[in-house]
Image (cartoon, coloured by chain):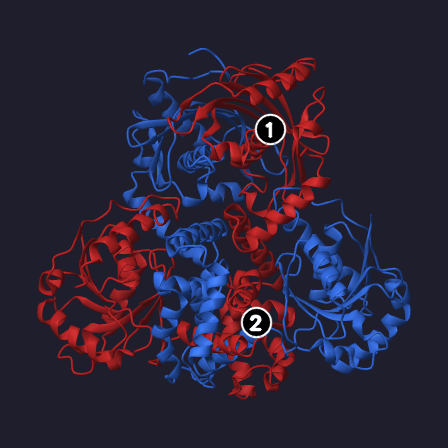
Chain colours: A red, B blue
Amino acid sequence: MSRTAAIIGAGVIGAGWAARFLLNGWNVRVFDPDPETEARVLSVLTAARLALPGLGDVALPPEGELSFPGLISETVRGADWVQESVPERIELKQKIYQALQASMEEKAILASSTSGFTPSELQAGSPRAGQILVAHPFNPVYLLPLVEVVASDRTTAEDVTRATEILTAIGMSPLKVRAEVPAHIADRLLEAVWREALWLVKDGVATTGEIDDAIRMGFGLRWAQMGLFETYRIVGGEGGMAYFLHQFGPALQWPWSKLTDVPEMDDDLVNRIAEQSDAQTGAQSIAEMEAQRDRNLVGILRALGYTGNGAGAVQLAADARNLATSGVPARFEEIDPAAPVRTIHRAVPLDWIDYNGHMTEARYLHVFGDATDRMMILVGCDRDYVAEGQSFFTVETHIRHIDEVRAGARLTVETRVLEGQGKKMHLWHELYSGDRLLATAEHMLLHVDLESRRSSPLTPLLAERLAILAKGHAALPRPVGLARAVGDRP
Amino acid sequence: MSRTAAIIGAGVIGAGWAARFLLNGWNVRVFDPDPETEARVLSVLTAARLALPGLGDVALPPEGELSFPGLISETVRGADWVQESVPERIELKQKIYQALQASMEEKAILASSTSGFTPSELQAGSPRAGQILVAHPFNPVYLLPLVEVVASDRTTAEDVTRATEILTAIGMSPLKVRAEVPAHIADRLLEAVWREALWLVKDGVATTGEIDDAIRMGFGLRWAQMGLFETYRIVGGEGGMAYFLHQFGPALQWPWSKLTDVPEMDDDLVNRIAEQSDAQTGAQSIAEMEAQRDRNLVGILRALGYTGNGAGAVQLAADARNLATSGVPARFEEIDPAAPVRTIHRAVPLDWIDYNGHMTEARYLHVFGDATDRMMILVGCDRDYVAEGQSFFTVETHIRHIDEVRAGARLTVETRVLEGQGKKMHLWHELYSGDRLLATAEHMLLHVDLESRRSSPLTPLLAERLAILAKGHAALPRPVGLARAVGDRP
């Protein structure tokens, strides 16, 4: 069953919709009179193809077909969904709806990406007003799940249900808005922050960069996983939301901000919030919520550590400082070649734990891969060396999983160079938690030219350093498990 | 060099400070008259020990010593840092500072966790006012990097620098606030959102749960990695922030929210914002910012997919739907035992790419581990089975890395059962992208009792199903690379 979406207006929002529908298996037709449209949509699609299909652990259905019919009538004819994302001018939108509705199916949904207008405003003057609703997405549309769905009393419940089902089927999280208000829900919250931020800049209290840091180093991280009320419920502790409101209520009367039109925190409002919060998360204890929050935050912070952005940059700087006390050499000259080299000293992150309650198997190779990276850096294959066009690729790995380990435990890896000449680096890693041997790993790596992606001889510095280590480590007792194949008898 | 922090007031904030200092190698003394203090601090410390040390890829220094001296004088004597986190009553804070300053070092920093008061208010009446400053953290203090540092003109520049250095050394991101205003920066933004959210609840536009979803499924995800202005700069495109402001400015005059005290968007304010934004991120093109944003968002969304919370729950539901078109069997009855079983069909996530520009080695085992999990589920070792106390642990792995793969590419894994009897499951996986063989993996797993953590015989259903597959797969040609040890000649 192949379905078709018509995208009317293809700025960054319309192009994002096109990518999301297409990558979720829909055929997509795009109309925008701008001559740059096709290039822009293809550019957004290139970014979306890198990002969206890998979001989950299961492949998306095969991509649909993309076309640019050039006429509104051809674009919308027979389409199941028409998404309008033209500039925020009500007369423009209403005029375009006349053209769309002249050619589109009576059964199709006509959804507007408007961030400000209500469905009733959009529907005014339309002969088939009930067909029009708001489906307001967030940039980048191909990644963020939120879409606010707003209907008027002229929209049928069936159409709202159908719209919600379609949006869910393309991986989104539709939020049905209960009332028609300008700017729906999320943009009202954003507008409030925006105004306060403008005052802070205007009054010279903070720069744009400082305000951004105040968000992304703090509450922005919390809001990626729990919202405002869940976060405050945790602050209230086992006393719940009503307790929090009684603590926090008085601050509302203080002139903290310029935006001082404040609802009265009477019993009615306190009870309403407390009841809604109980319905939302009352089944969970505060301790459970805290544990969940910490797992989410660790995962988010570690993801940012991998990209090195925002709070991730703070963590990378902390890691660089902590290296000094970790016992891991920072430079080749610090190595004693008569002993295995400590290449890792770290703790098991909370997000490395699986359904068996211990560090999951792939993270053993993650640690060993990091140990290999450290050895590469120590012998001279560092980021600069890689940037100049050569690196090592692992071609073969053997791991013995000997013991389990839990979140928070400290890990060390001791590494030996078995061989390092020609094009090869042959390594032996032993993973410990304290004195407890958790695993061993044997790796064969090839030195490669990153241009040709083929193996190439070690450069003299690498060969010299690897030879020093291989010679020193050859004098150590033979590692237990070396050259073993899966299932060999001990 | 062992340093000491004194924690005065040990609610959730004070206890969070205690954990952060302690796990970063400081000795910590805690004072709070509440008899539950020690239990509460130890509880927070247990959570922090699971979460904080694993945030980075390098071990923290050894933990400091924790004590509860029972007297304020003993708590603060000789301490390098005194952190006050008592309730938000100015008279209470000022009174406690008298007691603290009677015993603490003249050179030590006395920092308040206050979210609302200014340093000048805190300093009023103190004989050593310059010693007092604001260091306002965010819950959970042991995980979130943001700390707002606010000084008055009575604080020396040296003290501010020293405070900032100490906070950086314990892994935080100090934000020096330029001016003394009530609630500093972040809480003014939070206050604005809070008031708007209260109006939405009071007016019946949204429930607490709907507001939380409007945050965490959309802009909350963006704000975990870029803030307000960087996000809007991207919306403005190559036209930059001034272009965005001209587009967005008019909406400020619309009555979207109850909070309508709006600064005039005159040239002065537009230019100030545009200049600050250029200074903040002007060196990056919009395309670079978008690519960075997408890498961050994919990492964050995948981290939430692993925990299954917030937007992660949306992705898990999408994965469950997409399984139907993936060619991966959902149940044992769908398997043809005469052929290898497709156990994975997915795309390479953007956050699996390393400095060599391809899928990093540990993710090969990640995919193979997921393939093993799917085979386990198919033969009957699903989440319910694990919850009842039995599972499989991998004891040995051999991987041949044959070819590279890039972000967005589709992957499949074809799996054979080599043996499945007694306590063993012996698997063979082949990883493909299209027809291209990327890697093979041979795994030996043992069936284990999760109570004793020791191997145990397969249950009859598992043994029966594994025997059916082993028999079918034995008729296939022998896999190339089976039983190979690292470095064997082909």
Q: Residues within 10 Å of mark 2 (few under 14, many from 20)?
A: many
Residue placed most toward the observer, B465 or A181: A181
Residue A372 visible from this viewpoint: yes
Residue placed most toward the observer, B326 or A115: A115
Residue B209 is situated, as x and y percent measured from the top left of the image, at 46, 70
Which residue is at a point 21% across and 75% down the rendered structure image? Answer: A93
> From what the image shows, is residue A225 above or below residue B265?
above
Q: Mark 2 lies on which chain?
A: A
Amino acid type assigned to the residue bearing label 1 in the image: Met
Pointer 1 or 2: first along the chain:
2
- Contact? badges 1 and 2 (CB < 8 Å): no
Residue A173 visible from this viewpoint: no
Amino acid type assigned to the residue bearing label 2 in the image: Ala
Secondary structure type for disc 2: loop
Image quarter (top left, top right, bottom left or bottom right) of the C terminus of chain B: top left
Secondary structure type for disc 1: helix
Residue A286 is situated, as x and y percent measured from the top left of the image, at 61, 64
* Horizontal arrangement in the rendering, residue A129 relative to residue B72 (left or right): left
Residue labelled with disc 1? A375
Residue labelled with disc 2? A206
Q: Residue furthest top?
A: B489
| Quadrant of res B346 | top left
Residue B388 is situated, as x and y percent measured from the top left of the image, at 54, 43
